Image (cartoon, grey):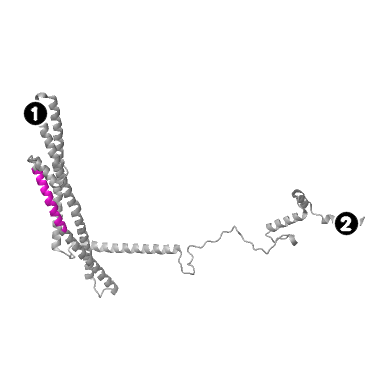
Amino acid sequence: MADRERSIHEMLKDAPSLNDSCGSVHTGTEGGSLVLGSASSHSIAGGGGHGAMGGPFAAPNSLPLRNHSAPTTPMSPSSPPSGNGIMSPTESGSGSLIRTSASKIDSLKNWSISTYKCTRQIMLEKLGKSQRTVDSELEAQIEQLRETQRKYLSILRLTRAFSSHFQHVVVTQHALADSFADLAQKNPELQKEFTCNSETQRNLTKNGELLLNALNFFISSVNTLCNKTIDDTLLTIRQYETARIEFDAYRMDLENTKPELTPSAAALEETQRSYAQHKEQYEKLRSDVAVKMQFLDENRIKVMHKQLILLHNAIAAYFSGNAMALESTLKQFNIKA
């Protein structure tokens, strides 16, 4: 009896626990499989180091483990170039940006220095403390050109006013001709007289329109001469005057530079180089102005000769009542009637 009780107690000890039995009943797995799952879950929860089960059910520890969820570390933009000496796009872009910034700073610096020197030169010339380079013959021609432009602009303004007033006259004559024609129809006793006046006003209107065409052609040609051709030459003249001021400013700097007071030979050489550069630019623009003024004078004489003959013949033919001469004048200058 005692042996039987001991065997029963040993059987109870070898039997699985109630929790494991419930798991096997609900899952339909055998005890060994349950032990494997339990051991695996414990090994995962405990980092694989606290599993109580060993033997064939233990997870193998010879396979390398890798964390796939951890992102790979990208290469830093500021990382040094690779061993083959090739620079990254970021480094090359930074280098070009630095060079561009340096170029802009140098340009601003040169512009500031040049502006300061030119302003100082202008003030010294107005105060009589600096001598300016003078080309008497060229400056006399420039002043004459500006005076010519002022007078031509005055002629242009007066001709436009004359054309505007005369256009009102032509419009009034046309309305008057229509009124005479209407009255000729409504007044039989004065039909002949009204018709005669209507025809006269119509002829005057027709000739007036021809004269207006001639005036508009004259205005267009003189306007092109004053506001385009002469202005183009005056633009070159303004560039020449600016170059003259810059040349005098650097010339004065060179004259005031004393070799014994110069900190270095490089500074003196730079001053001489700037003076030579501005002198060359000044002489080039002076030559350009002389050539342009010569061609402008020839063109001006040619254009004004043609336009003055047109204006004279057209006005003389209109006010003398010579309609045929007026028409031939417009044909002579290829003006559409």
Dominant SS type (magenta): helix
Q: Position of residue 191 (x, y in %)?
A: 10, 26
Q: Nearer the viewer, residue 200 or 93?
A: 200
Task: Please identify the quarter of the rendering in which residue 182 is found.
Answer: top left
In the picture of the structure, the residue carrying the numbered disc 1 is 193
Residue 7: which numbered mark, if any?
A: 2
Farthest left residue in view: 320
* Residue lying at 17% horizontally and 52% vertically, measured from the top left: 225
- Left or right: residue 227 versus residue 18 is left
The N terminus: image quadrant: bottom right
Q: Earlier in the sequence, mark 2 or mark 1?
A: 2
Q: Residue at x 46, y 64 (%)?
A: 88
**Residues shaded magenta:** 295-316
Residue 159: numbered disc: none
**Mark 2 Cα within 10 Å, few/some/many (few <14, many 20+)?**
few
Provide residue 93's location: percent of width, then percent of height.
42, 62
Give the amino acid at mark 1: Glu
- Magenta-colored stretch includes residue 296: yes
Which residue: 9% across, 24% down? 189
Please tell me whether mark 2 sits on a helix, a strand or a loop: helix
The image position of residue 119, as x and y in percent, is 24, 61
Spatial CA span between label 2 and label 1: 161 Å
Q: Would you place residue 301 above or below residue 276 in this image?
A: above
**Which quarter of the picture shows residue 186?**
top left
Residue 266 appears in the picture as rendered: yes
Q: Position of residue 165 (x, y in %)?
A: 14, 40
The residue under label 2 is which amino acid type?
Ser
Counting other residues with Cα less than 10 Å from the Cα at mark 1, is it few (<14), some (14-19), or many (20 or more)? few
In this view, the residue in front, 148 or 334, is: 334
